[in-house]
Every structure is written in C-alpha cells, then in structure tokens.
Image: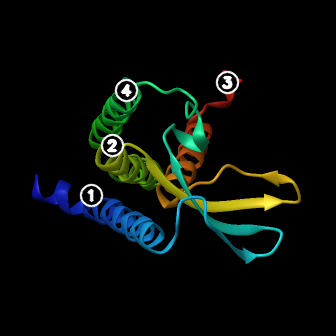
C-alpha cells in the first residue's frame, strides 16, 4: 500500500502544484484588476482580462440565470472529479501518460470547483486573440483541463488496436 502511494506521489504533487498556481493567479487578478479590466501583454495576440465566468468552460451556459445553476455545475464537477480519481486509482500507475492526463484534468476541475463554491463564478483572465477573433477567456485550471484532455486523447489513440479501424 505504501509503495502504491509513493508511486502516485508525483501525480498528487502535480495536482497540488497546479491548484496552488491556479489559486495564486486568480487571487492576484482579483486583487489587482477590476472586473472586465484588460491590459495588453502582447499587442494583437494576448491580453489579461478579468472576467467572472458563471458558466462552464469558455462561458458555456453563462446566459442561463437560475439559482440552481451554480449548484448543478458544482455537483457535476464534483462527480466528474470523483470519476477521475477512481479511474486513476484503478489504472496502472506505470501508465505515466494516463496518470499525467488524469492529474491535469483533476487539478483543473478542483481549481474551478473551488471558485464556483466560494464565489458562485470562476475567475478567468487569459485572453488570446488574432485580429477580431477572440478565444474565450480562460485560466490556469482551464489550461490544465485542456492539456489533460489532449493527453488523454493521445493515450486512447495510442491504445487503439489497428484492427478496430
């Protein structure tokens, strides 16, 4: 049992580090910016813009105004995080790509869940754009989830047998 924990310790430390980074950046933005305030970092490509996202990833469901929305989104995120933990524990620790992907997804989910439970919204602040095209504003937790999902997709594709094609 102890060796299983020790083998998973790097992934637990990664989850903790990403949550700390996510909290630190969001706290910094909340303390130094007004809502919707923006500063250009790389003109024509990258701004820091403080947004309060009441929806899910990239503002989906933001327009729905129901007192139950935050509760339902928090419950969904909690269930998803629990599923990720169970899947991680039941999967071989030696499968590093899978464990890394699940750790990133979990840390992002927990980072945004903290915001939703504490504030009722998620603090987003990273805005990428080219010309008039703006990618929806996001945060460190969203980045971790996105990278984790891409790695999970790579893991799934890697394990598909050619005979299934």
**CA gap, disc 2 to disc 4?**
33 Å
Residue shown at the point (48%, 69%) measured from the top left: 29
Q: Secondary structure at mark 4?
A: helix
Residue hosting label 4: 67
Q: Report how far apart the C-alphas of labels 4 and 3 lie in the structure.
A: 49 Å
Q: Which mark is residue 163?
A: 3
Seen from the viewer's position, the closer of residues 133 and 111 is: 133
Task: Kindly report which numbered mark, 3 or 2, lies closer to the viewer in this rendering.
Answer: 2
Q: Tag 3, which secondary structure?
A: helix
Residue 154 against residue 45 in the figure, above or below: above
65, 10: nearer the viewer: 65
Alpha carbon separation for disc pair 1 and 4: 38 Å
Q: Position of residue 148 (x, y in %)?
A: 51, 50
Query: Which residue shows up at 60% across the image and 45% down it?
Result: 154
* Residues at discs 2 and 1 in contact (Cβ within 8 Å): yes
Q: Residue furthest front?
A: 34
- Residue 12 position, x and y percent, is 28, 60
Gap in angstroms between the C-alphas marked 2 and 1? 9 Å
Q: Which residue is mark 1?
A: 8
Mark 1 touches mark 3? (CB < 8 Å): no
Which is more foreground, mark 2 or mark 4?
4
Q: Is residue 153 visible to us here?
A: no
Q: Hey, which quadrant is residue 158 in on the image?
A: top right
């Amino acid at each position: 049992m102890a060796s299983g924990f020790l083998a998973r310790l790097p992934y637990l430390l990664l989850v903790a580090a990403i949550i700390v980074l996510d909290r630190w950046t969001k706290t910094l933005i909340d303390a130094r910016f007004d809502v919707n305030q923006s500063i250009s970092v790389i003109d024509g490509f990258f701004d820091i813009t403080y947004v309060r996202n009441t929806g899910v990833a990239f503002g989906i469901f933001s327009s729905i105004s129901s007192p139950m929305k935050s509760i339902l989104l928090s419950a969904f995120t909690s269930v998803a995080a629990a599923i990720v933990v169970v899947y991680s524990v039941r999967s071989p620790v030696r499968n590093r790509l899978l464990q890394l992907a699940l750790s990133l997804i979990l840390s992002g989910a927990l980072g945004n869940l903290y915001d939703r439970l504490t504030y009722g919204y998620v603090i987003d602040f990273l805005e990428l754009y080219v010309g008039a095209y703006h990618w929806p504003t996001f945060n460190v937790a969203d980045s971790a989830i996105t990278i984790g999902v891409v790695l999970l997709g790579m893991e799934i594709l890697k394990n598909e047998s050619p005979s299934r094609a």
